[in-house]
Image (tube, rainbow, N blue to C red):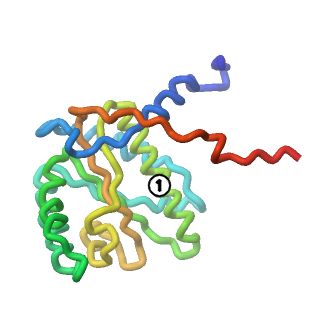
Amino acid sequence: MSVTPATAFDPGTITHLIRSRRSVFTAQFEPGKTIPDELITEILENANTAPTHKLTEPWRFTVFTGNGLQKLADEQAAIYKKYAGPKFKQAKYDQMLITPMLCSHVIGIGLKRHVEIPEMEEIAAVACAVQNIYLTITAYGIGGYWSTGGITYLEQAKPLFNLSPEDKFLGFFYLGYIRVPSIRRTPGSIGEKVNWVRE
């Protein structure tokens, strides 16, 4: 498809970017290599342009880097140990102390609730913001992934991310430079997921 004057972007390039998006995990990161904070800000500026019903912009981000990674590791492990109850697993606790330290930055993903908006619509808006993060890091050759593990579903975790009880914590986005790329996964056929109605 050719690019017309009204089209600001090359569709082929955008398609390639979208289809190149992959989750890259901490074991694949380049140890000790730090992403510039200015680039993290650029990534979050792009996240901030996501679609949002009633323009509530419900996404909230807490960025951990430098000594903040140790703070996250210590505090999330302590919260998990105190409140996990019978679901507590030592291996999971140990991993919480390790995972942040393998990253350049960790972004806590919050949702600031607006009671006049259905919750699902605000979750969708935050998910769109996270997809903007994914696409931006792909363009810059940075690795990362969204995880809803650890303390994500513990109510007691919310204060660590400046969230109120009515807000939602939606997990972490882990970031680092890529040492080992992810293998490209071929998605299932779109034909099995689409129903065309023509009449």
Query: Circle 1 sits on which residue?
Result: 127
The relative height of residue 105 versus residue 186 in the rendered view (above or below) is below
| Residue occupying image coordinates x 24% and y 33% | 180
Between 113 and 86, the one lying in front of the other is 86
SS at circle 1: helix
| Residue occupying image coordinates x 53% and y 70% | 119
Q: How many marks?
A: 1
Is residue 175 left or right of 56 when viewed as pictured?
Answer: left
Q: Residue furthest top?
A: 2
The relative height of residue 109 versus residue 131 in the rendered view (above or below) is below
- Identified by mark 1, the residue type is Ala
Between 110 and 18, the one lying in front of the other is 18
How far across and down, in percent of the image, does residue 99 sit? 18, 54
- Dividing the picture into quarters, in which one does residue 71 lie? bottom left
The relative height of residue 82 versus residue 173 in the rendered view (above or below) is below
Is residue 198 left or right of 165 when viewed as pictured?
Answer: right
The relative height of residue 43 versus residue 90 in the rendered view (above or below) is above
Sort mark 1 into few (<14), some (14-19) or many (20+) by Cα contacts within 10 Å: many
How far across and down, in percent of the image, does residue 33 sit? 15, 36
- Dividing the picture into quarters, in which one does residue 92 lie? bottom left
| Residue occupying image coordinates x 35% and y 43% | 23
| Residue occupying image coordinates x 36% and y 67% | 169
- Dividing the picture into quarters, in which one does residue 118 lie? bottom right
How far across and down, in percent of the image, does residue 62 sit? 29, 58
How far across and down, in percent of the image, does residue 107 sit? 29, 54
Is residue 135 left or right of 99 when viewed as pictured?
Answer: right
- Quadrant occupied by the N terminus: top right
Q: Residue furthest right?
A: 199
